[in-house]
Image: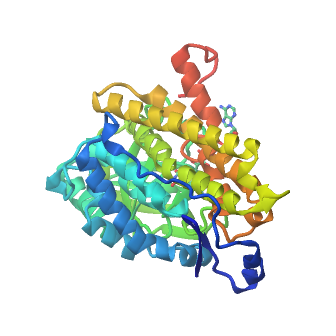
Amino acid sequence: MATIIGTTVLRRTTRNLRPLSRLLSTETHLKIKLEPYELTHETIFNEDHAELRASLNKFIQKEINPFVDEWENAKSFPAHELFKKIGSAGFFGVNKPTKYGGLGLDYSFSVAMAEELGSITCGAIPMAIGVQADMATPALMRFGSEELKKQFLVPTIAGDFVACLGVSEPGAGSDVASIKTVAVKKGDDYVINGSKLWITNGLQADWICLLVNTSEGPAHKNKSLICVPLNLPGVQKARNINKLGMHSSDTAELFFEDVKVPQSYRIGKEGMGFTYQMMQFVDERVFAGASVLLSMERLINDTAAYCAQRKAFGKSILDNQYVHFRLAELQTEVELLRSLVYRTTALYLEGKDVNKLASMLKLKAGRLVREVPDSCLQFWGGMGFTSDVEVSRAYRDNRLLSIGGGADEVMLSIICKYMGTFPKDQTLF
Ligand SMILES: Cc1cc2nc3c(=O)[nH]c(=O)nc-3n(C[C@H](O)[C@H](O)[C@H](O)COP(=O)(O)OP(=O)(O)OC[C@H]3O[C@@H](n4cnc5c(N)ncnc54)[C@H](O)[C@@H]3O)c2cc1C
């Protein structure tokens, strides 16, 4: 059930919250102007990007947003069912060649898609889609053999397979180089032993892009990425981890005990896994920054609409200069992040090293997605503290961004390395 307040839709799903509805006036005293975002004045986007985004938005409004509350409450979403629909619509292979079932477009279309995923009214589903499109598959696309792409990439782009990425372990998160999972050669196979923690899509996934140690030696030269089917003997999907936010996302702990895969399942060269993963992280970080822009803007707009109709001390909350100035400051910050995302994308398209910029935008995004819901929630008062409104969900979900995909401090360390200020006697990678 939904209550329309001006241009804003407030979600009301639970019966016991009905009494609070008397606090929500259905009249708006200020018409909040929500201009459609002008895509075509951006250097990286043209009408084709706008068309892709419009069709993705239509898909989201029909196939995703009506079900978000249900999936969040169930702490799961039907990955295979949804991903098949997304794959059939072509959204998983936007920048992948047509011979693998992709749309054959350039990377800017992938960023346009990531940005439009911000139209989804939670953080978990964009993250799950991002894992499939931009986190578990870039290395396979770049360095995988044709046979491997046929076996894993093609069905993933089609949405027949659900993919996940396995880097983090119980004893190694920020310090990727110190992972302990090993793959030892035996005949034509690798035998894998170890475990992975915090794996998004892990419970429902058909295969994992797994970072393992394949030899002794220096930690950044002894690793490989391997495509591992998750239905093999020895794979145990242990549990769905209870979390502060991102409720509809499954976050698994996975164990590997004497799991045998052919050596041909290795992506690219042996010993290059760490390097490949660092490259894959760039895609992940740009995705992270792009995918939160629209949701932050929606929160700002919804907050303005709510504050416009909510009265205190004889005037609307929005009419307090502190409130409308603060919302203007937040909108300004979002535009700055957008500029950084687009600039990074433009340089990436030119083949430049954007590791520093991608780390900066991930750092900025991680902090801003905490600041925006926190400030907005304050202006919703008690209503902001209920599960009834999107702002409280965003407050919970967005906390992850400063931790996952490289914590803020790891981003700062990378930036310091590029600035030449990282202590010479310390190692990062
Ligand atoms: C919901 C969720 C989904 C995830 N999905 C995936 C996934 O799909 N695949 C995957 O591989 N991983 C995934 N992760 C793991 C995530 O990437 C790690 O949690 C993250 O890299 C941090 O690692 P850690 O949790 O082990 O923290 P630690 O490495 O133990 O670090 C803890 C804290 O210490 C601080 N710190 C760390 N290093 C430094 C430093 N050099 N200087 C100063 N401070 C520092 C930071 O504040 C950091 O947050 C997910 C995590 C969560 C919570």
The answer to which of 256 and 248 lies nearer the viewer is: 248
The answer to which of 231 and 352 lies nearer the viewer is: 352
The answer to whether residue 267 is visible is: no
Total number of numbered labels? 0
Locate residue 59: give its quadrant. Answer: bottom left
Image coordinates for residue 324, horizontal then vertical, percent: 68, 45
> In screen coordinates, is 368 left or right of 110?
right
Locate residue 344: give its quadrant. Answer: top left
The answer to which of 315 and 129 lies nearer the viewer is: 315
> In screen coordinates, is 79 left or right of 104?
right
Image coordinates for residue 206, horizontal then vertical, percent: 38, 67
Tell which quarter ligand 1 is in: top right
Image coordinates for residue 363, horizontal then vertical, percent: 58, 36
Seen in the picture, residue 367 relative to 148 is either above or below; the reply is: above
Image coordinates for residue 352, horizontal then vertical, percent: 33, 25
Instruction: Identify the residue at horizontal 45%, vertical 76% (top origin).
Output: 78
Return the residue found at the far bottom.
Answer: 15
The answer to which of 367 and 179 lies nearer the viewer is: 367
The answer to whether residue 6 is visible is: yes
Locate residue 42: give its quadrant. Answer: top left
Seen in the picture, residue 160 relative to 351 is either above or below; the reply is: below
Instruction: Identify the residue at horizontal 53%, vertical 62% (top origin).
Output: 124
Seen in the picture, residue 6 relative to 414 is either above or below; the reply is: below
> In screen coordinates, is 214 left or right of 351?
right
